Image (cartoon, helix red, strand yellow):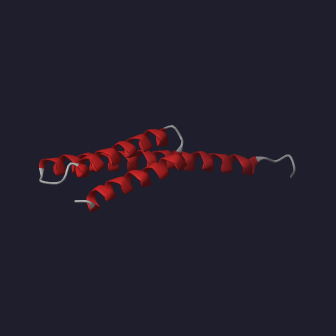
Amino acid sequence: MPGDHAGDAGDGEEYVGDARRARWAAVATGALLTCAGLAAALLRSAGAAPAFVPVAYALGAAVCASAAVLGARGRTRRALWMLIAGTMIMALGDQSD
């Protein structure tokens, strides 16, 4: 029927649920990568690694932390790209070790 909108309500609720899951995934992934980057920075700074290595891990962790904040605010696409960038920064530091 043209005036029947019963099917539209389910689609809207599904969209809200997907958006909520995307935000939680961005926040959880950002927090996990932040903790991993900070732990690696602390471990590498205690060892005989060049100074660039712990700085790269800490910078990557900071980028991932800002991605978690963006994800919490609903900017999940930007958060995804920032998570990728933060992980690449940490990988660059790992490669130079």
**Number of numbered callouts drawn:** 0
59 or 96, which is in the foreground? Answer: 96
* Residue 48 found in image quarter: bottom left
User: How far across and how far down the image is residue 66, in percent?
Assistant: 42, 40
Looking at the figure, which quarter contains the C terminus? bottom left
User: How far across and how far down the image is residue 80, in percent?
Assistant: 48, 51
User: How far across and how far down the image is residue 46, in percent?
Assistant: 12, 48
17 or 53, which is in the foreground? Answer: 53
25 or 37, which is in the foreground? Answer: 37
17 or 28, which is in the foreground? Answer: 28
User: How far across and how far down the image is residue 74, in percent?
Assistant: 53, 41
Q: Is residue 21 visible?
A: no
Tell me: 91 left or right of 22: left
Q: Is residue 73 visible?
A: yes
Relative vertical location of residue 35 with respect to residue 91 in this rendering, above or below: above
Tell me: 40 left or right of 73: left
Tell me: 41 left or right of 33: left
Q: Residue furthest bottom?
A: 95
